[in-house]
Image (tube, grey):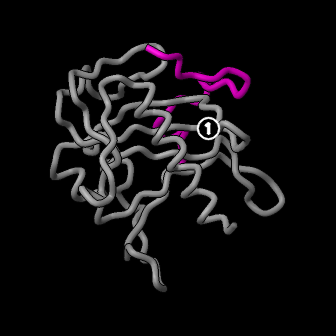
Amino acid sequence: MSALESSKASGDALEAELVQTIDALEFVGDRTATWHDARTTSLLEPDESLPFYGIVLVESETPVEIKGCQIETSNGDRSTRGRFYVKRAAHEQLLEAAGMYLLVVYIPRPGLPQVARAIVPATLVDELLAGRWYEVGGSRSESEVAKLTWSHVIEPAGVDPSTTVGDRR
């Protein structure tokens, strides 16, 4: 399995778990929309396991793109904080729809334990991505992407690799 297939499988697993454990979320398949993974079915409010950044609540019918990244990733001979990978075309659609990102930091081991989560408006992510877009060649489905280190969004001091988030609610 390639790294790309592996990150896709991890992303799918995270999406499935989050949609199952967060009552206000409903899965949206790629046949319906490729630019977001879920939508809210009722009012979504922050709690201890799901802090919100820049907003106080998420209204019903809001598109939500779920992005996961590893807490740390190999960077040659050392490790660095993981990064969220954002496709420009999908990001633009989420922005236009006043959508949200549900960002998840996980440990790359069985069960993908989540150590941090956050709901962030696409407009805020857009500001954080300014100047980070770059062209991708080859046969990829997108032409422009950006990477965002999780610590640019989530305060690292509040992330403890030995403590997982996401109690059922």
Check the picture and name the quadrant holding the N terminus: bottom right
Residue at the farthest right position:
77
Relative image position of residue 102 (x, y in whole percent): 40, 37
Comparing 23 with 164, the one in front is 23
How would you rate the neighbour count of disc 1 (Cα within 10 Å): few for under 14, some for 14-19, many for 20 or more? many
Where 84 sits versus 158, above or below?
A: below
Residue at the farthest bottom position:
138
**Main SS, magenta residues:** loop
Residue at disc 1, secondary structure: strand
Q: Mark 1 points at which residue?
A: 106
Residue in the picture at 40% in, 66% down: 133
Q: Does the magenta stretch include residue 150?
A: yes
Residue in the picture at 30% in, 25% down: 24
Where 14 sits versus 53, above or below?
A: below
Side (left or right) of 78 relative to 126: right
Residue in the picture at 31% in, 42% down: 38
Amino acid carrying label 1: it is Tyr
Where 50 sits versus 2, above or below?
A: above
Residue in the picture at 78% in, 63% down: 76
- Magenta stretch in the rendered image: 149-169
Relative image position of residue 155 (x, y in whole percent): 53, 29
Relative image position of residue 25 (x, y in whole percent): 32, 31
Relative image position of residue 151 (x, y in whole percent): 55, 39
Q: Does the magenta stretch include residue 159?
A: yes
Residue 56 occupies quadrant? top left
Where 122 sits versus 167, above or below?
A: below
